[in-house]
Amino acid sequence: MTEKNSFVGLALILALVGGCATDRSSMPVEEITFTPRGPLDPDPTDRTVGRLPGGSAGAMLLSLESGWFELTGPAEPGTASLTDAPMWDPFNSEMPPFGVGGGTLDVTVSPEHYTASDGDAFVARFTDDEGTEYLVLSVFSETLVGGEHWQNNVAVIVPLSDFAPDGTVALDGMDRIAVFAAGPDGPEPTVVAVAITGTVTFGEGSTEIDGHLSATVAADFAPATIAEAPGGGEGVPLVPGSYDLVINLVPEVFCGGTMSGHEDSFAGTTLDEVGAADGEVTLSLPTEGTVELAGAAMGAAFGDPVSLDAIANPPDTYVALTDLGVATGPDSTVLAGAYWLIEGRPMAPELIHAALGLAYVAGDGSEGGCDALFYAELRARP
């Protein structure tokens, strides 16, 4: 569960550090992310600190200022339901939705048991800073606690793209999380519990603004506290040691110039030409501004160890480049070079995001090319 960090495309990197002959590479200047996409192997590390999806907008909607939480105890099963809940855009509407749907909740945060059979419900729809749209399914009720009015609330955040009538979505602790919050009126709740496992089952409905939606939630809620972002929100230094390199073998492809529109031709790209694969690597910091990664898993094309140099823009990023000049590639391209990128200040020392890119250029010498980007992780070994 790490905060996303972005870096510029290969064209700018080459301008900064010089090196291989991939100056016609197509990686766009707009941001890509360190966050891995697709089916990486499950991470076995037991983590108790996480962040709400949706960035600052998600944190604001749930009144959790930092957006980070720490699980502090064992989880217990809980449920919630929304019936005919209206859809609302909280960031582009001055008022909550007119009318609410029906809702129920049943959550235990030991030793207290919180229930409501006649609660209210609505669904908020918003877009985070990176353009991802989310739904927040919310059930809430009021009760008296020691003479104070408390609000009990179950909120589930999932990507908008997950919605399908009668479909079921599994919580994953990353982009799909359920939160229970209870307390009197105030800046932050008194009681917090978070579910990173469980399911959301949608009924019939629409995710369009002013539409209505029904859903049921069955999840395991663990008591939690509001936490500070690791490293004070600025990341932590790299830690020398042994790591498991895990690579997502499904590339994200960027094409530009005369190769625009050729992305599908590179969907089956593999790492055979560089020899990189999952495996153990050793990270060291020989000099300021240099990172070395030793191990055959990094790919024979880069040598062993691979030496990565810090670049100024984006900050806290290390890059290694190698020329290939392989005269084969889809759609008459040439595989001109390859590059490793790793983040220099990860949000947690045990998990470092990385990316391995293959740079193809148009074989006819025109200004065009395609980059196949394989996202990866370096996971600290026990």
Image (cartoon, rainbow, N blue to C red):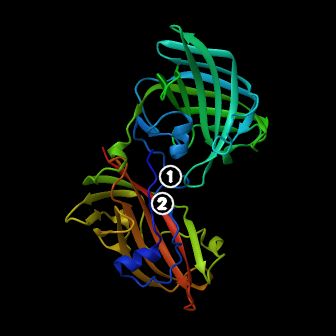
Q: Secondary structure at mark 1?
A: loop
Question: Which quarter of the picture shows residue 61?
Answer: top right
Does any portion of residue 272 appear in the rendered image?
no
Identify whether 98 is placed above or below 374.
Answer: above
Q: Is residue 239 left or right of residue 379?
A: left
Residue at the disc numbered 1: 40
316 or 73: which is nearer to us?
316
For this orientation, the residue located farthest to the bottom is: 364
For label 1, the crowd category at 10 Å Cα-Cα, with few meaning under 14, some 14 to 19 and many 20 or more, is: some
Residue placed under numbered mark 2 in the picture: 375
What percent of the width, then of the height, locates residue 354?
A: 41, 60
Residue type at the position of mark 1: Leu
Picture layout, residue 321 above or below residue 363? above
Which residue sits furthest front? 94
112 lies above or below 340? above
Q: Tell whether label 2 touches label 1 (CB within 8 Å).
A: yes
Distance from disc 1 to disc 2, alpha carbons, whole Å, reads 9 Å
Q: Where is the C terminus found, in terms of image quarters?
A: top left
Image coordinates of residue 172 in percent, x first then y, are 54, 39
The x and y percentages for residue 353 are: 41, 56
**Residue 26 seen in the figure:** yes
Q: Is residue 192 left or right of residue 83?
A: left
N-term mark: 1 or 2: 1
Q: Nearer the viewer, mark 1 or mark 2?
A: 2
- Category of crowding for the residue at label 2, using alpha-carbon neighbours closer than 10 angstroms: few (below 14), some (14–19), many (at least 20): many
Give 47 or 298, whichever is nearer the viewer: 47
